[in-house]
Amino acid sequence: MKTSLLAPILSLLILSVSPAQAADQAADGAKPLATIPALDVKRYMGTWYEIAKFPNDFQKKCVGFTTATYSLREDGRVDVLNRCRRADGSTDDAKAVARQVGEATSPKLEVRFAPAIVSWLPMVWGDYWVIDLDPDYQLAAVSEPKREYLWILSRTPKVDPAAYDALLGRLRAQGLDMNRLVPTKQGE
């Protein structure tokens, strides 16, 4: 496993927003970010292709072909494998574990890329909120309370343009800046 993604991802998690900070965000006039009403974690498992994202430091070496694969563990948590291709053709892998926050249908998860030995530290867990998901679990959007990060994920490398445009409209209505969105290369 390559670890070049690990250090930047750890930085993101350390800077992750706490629930109190998320509540403070509403005080600046922005509506709190809304999630989907409920998430069936078992249906969410499998491989998702990154269709677009807000640029971020921990993926700056990725040139495309980015996927996230989720696998349900016996303890109810989720194993995460993020993979992308670098400019030299090599692959970067980043492994993590995710846990739901709240009830069994909560669309709010936390992800930890740091070693398990430090999992007791709140700052190593980053928010992973499913904010949009079609009924067939084929197209999703993931963000966090401060709207600094956004990923659009699909079960296939290409998305129906009408479904994608409709999703962008819903994300814009949530206060996400679609001008920051960058498409991810998924094909030759």
Image (tube, grey):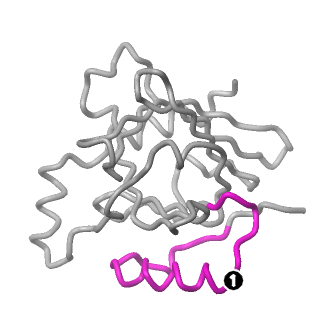
Choose top left, top right, bottom left or bottom right for residue 11: top left
| Vertical comparison of 167 with 141: above or below | below
Magenta residues, as a range? 154-183
**Quarter of the image containing the N terminus?**
top right
In the rendered image, residue 137 lying in the magenta stretch gets the answer: no
Residue at horizontal 43%, vertical 77%?
171
Report which residue position mark 1 lands on: 161
Give the structural element (helix, strand or loop) at label 1.
Answer: helix
Closest to the observer, 93 or 101: 101
- The part of the image, by quadrant, that contains residue 165 is bottom right
Relative depth, front residue between 36 and 40? 40
Task: Find out whether residue 156 is within the magenta segment.
Answer: yes
Q: Which residue is at the front of the view, 80 or 124?
A: 80
Q: Residues within 10 Å of mark 1 (few under 14, many from 20)?
A: few
The type of residue carrying mark 1 is Pro
Residue 43 vs 95, above or below: the answer is: below
